[in-house]
Amino acid sequence: MSKSTNRPQFTVITVTYNAGKTIQRTLDSVAEQTLDDIEHLIIDGCSTDCTMQLIQRYVELNADREIPRAINLIREPDEGLYDAMNKGLQAAKGEYVLFLNAGDKLHEPNTLELAASHLAKFNSSRHPAILYGETDWVDDAGRFLRHRRLKAPEQLTSRSFLWGMLICHQSFYVRADIARSKPYNLAWHFSADYDWCIRIMQLAERRGLAMYNTGLILTDYLAEGLTTRNHRRSLMERLRIMAHHYGWLSAIAAHLWFCIRAVIKK
């Protein structure tokens, strides 16, 4: 295991609300990581089920580790998922932030160690704005369903997301200083993560910072999130976000292609 430093290399942000059925898998995933330089920041919106008991047990077990992890908890009411995520961005102490919500897990015990190893390729003052990779989808029991259909591009640009959210939000690690400067827009209720990723990429390009493909499967993603449960409204919101960033003509053309592609794949 790596030795802990004063500043964690990664802050894993987990947003919870009555997540007792799925949170344990996520807690176990972070606990088993071989990299020690991790902060686990849990943002709970005042859960009323067993979520807090599971988190408390997680904290107690962490205290028995040879090198205890930094586990920090914010428990207070919020204005929804993206408001809670903004709280996480502001409180994070790590160099990079990543979101791992209840039911999601890091793909392997050494996922963050492997991701961190890529940073040695860069000057410490010019670390990439973004580290990214692939995602697998899992069911409620954590069983593999399939590889995510959309593949992460080898070379990422701010226009890559014209063709959809090619990188799962949970496999999109952002330098904390950059992430904090672009909070989630709470005007978007279902697809603020899509808008946020585009704005982060635009900022990375303006600053001339790398967006680096790790080539790793980073996340096992629970296929039942906010966007999945509100699929139609999410698609309409995504269209408006796409038009905002790329123009209505490009947005409509892209969505026509999505429809054609769906028919072809049947």
Image (cartoon, rainbow, N blue to C red):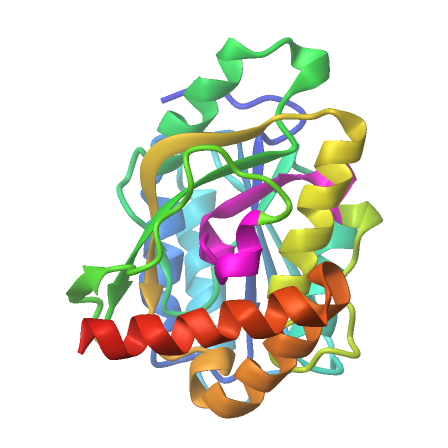
Q: Is residue 192 magenta?
A: no
Quadrant containing the C terminus is bottom left
Residue 8 occupies quadrant: top right
Residue visible at 39% across and 78% down in the picture: 259
Q: Is residue 164 magenta?
A: yes
Horizontally, is 131 left or right of 75 in the view? left
Horizontally, is 51 left or right of 192 in the view? left
In this rendering, is residue 20 above or below 158? Answer: below
**Image x and y of residue 250, in percent:** 63, 64
Horizontally, is 227 left or right of 1 in the view? right
Question: Residue furthest toward the right?
Answer: 181
Horizontally, is 11 left or right of 185 in the view? left
In this rendering, is residue 123 above or below 3? Answer: above
Residue visible at 62% across and 76% down in the picture: 239
Find the magenta span and give its range.
160-179
In this rendering, is residue 240 above or below 154? Answer: below
Quadrant containing the N terminus is top left
**Image x and y of residue 49, in percent:** 47, 88
